[in-house]
Image (tube, rainbow, N blue to C red):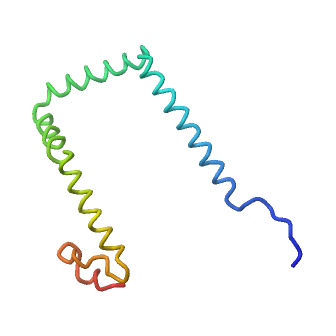
Amino acid sequence: MAPSSLGPPPHAPERRAAVLVASVLTVCSALLVTLVAAEGRPLTTLDGDIARATHRWAVDEPGLTRAVRILTGWVWAPLTMRLVRGAAAVRLVGAARPGGRPCGRWRPVRSARWCSRR
């Protein structure tokens, strides 16, 4: 078999775009970290302005403040997130069993029709 000339890979522009996006995000992150480490005045001023505005908003709306406290204290609490992660891990381990059906133990959660499909 004779060697043929190969052109560039078919996905080269997509890779260049991904590298460009990653580079831009890296530069932005480095700039932000530098501003935080140096306690840059524009960043601290912006942070103070946002803190004062959200404090005024929280004082003016006690019902909304109570709802946010419930969300942060219960819904997004570390224990809740650990339980969600644990349930996801159990689900993924059940799905990864060789020859096993992914919803074997989750039949009450999923419909029987979905579980019977292969």
- Give the residue at x 17% y 28%: 58
Relative side of 3 to 16, left or right: right
Which quadrant would residue 91 be assigned to in this image?
Answer: bottom left
Q: Is residue 108 above or below residue 37?
A: below
How many numbered marks have been drawn onto this rendered protein structure? 0
Q: Residue at x 87, y 79 (%)?
A: 1
Q: Residue furthest front?
A: 98
Left or right, 3 with reference to 48: right
Give the answer, above or below, for where 110 lies relative to 40. below
Single out the residue that lies furthest toward the right: 2
* Quarter of the image where the C terminus is located: bottom left
Q: Which residue is more in the foreground, 56 or 71?
A: 71
Q: Position of residue 31 (x, y in %)?
A: 51, 26
Question: 23 or 52: which is nearer to us?
Answer: 23
Furthest toward the top, the residue is 41
* Relative image position of residue 63 (x, y in whole percent): 10, 36
Query: Where residue 43 sits: x, y (%)?
Result: 41, 20
Q: Residue at x 33, y 73 (%)?
A: 95
- At a point 18% along the width and 41% down the height, the residue shown is 72
Estimate the x, y position of residue 62 in percent, counting from the top left: 10, 31
Above or below 74: residue 4: below
- Give the camera-side residue of 66 and 31: 31
